[in-house]
Image (cartoon, rainbow, N blue to C red):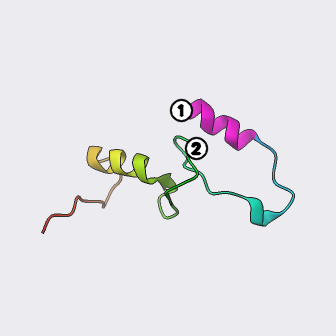
Amino acid sequence: MARLAKIVASKRKPKFEVRRKNRCELCGRARGYIGKFKLCRICFRTNALKGFIPGVLKASW
């Protein structure tokens, strides 16, 4: 998966800035992107549950 992210990052800059797409830094996924953490929802969830993201706790009520 990290290889895919490098391939996506190495692509050239789009002609127009509006065409730029936010992508997950770990896997390169374009959908479900959380801008504050620069991760997709799937990578965010797995890393949060493992405790790799400081200050993020699983909600319980």
Amino acid type, callout 2: Gly
Counting residues from the start of the chain, the first of labels 2 and 1 encountered is: 1
- Numbered marks: total: 2
Position of 45 with respect to 37 (left or right) is left
In the rendered image, residue 24, in percent from the top left (x then y), is placed at 54, 49
x 35%, y 50%: residue:
45
| Circle 1 SS class | loop
Magenta region: 1-10
Vertical relation: 34 (above or below) 47: below
Percent across and percent down for residue 19 are: 76, 60
User: Would you say the residues marked 2 and 1 are in contact, meaning their CB atoms lie under 8 Å apart?
Assistant: yes
Q: CA distance from mark 2 to mark 1?
A: 8 Å
Q: Please give the residue where the numbered disc 2 appears in the rendered image.
A: 28
Q: With respect to residue 27, does 55 lie above or below?
A: below
- Location of the C terminus by quadrant is bottom left
Q: Quadrant of residue 12?
A: top right
Above or below residue 14? Residue 8 is above
* Vertical placement of residue 35 versus 25, above or below: below
Give residue 10's position: percent from left, percent from top.
74, 39
Q: Callout 1: 10 Å neighbours few (<14), some, many (20+)?
A: few
**Which residue carries the number 1 mark?**
1
The structure residue drawn at horizontal position 43% and vertical position 53%, both measured from the top left corner, is 41
Q: Name the residue furthest right.
A: 15
Where residue 42 appears, as percent x and y from the top left, is 41, 48
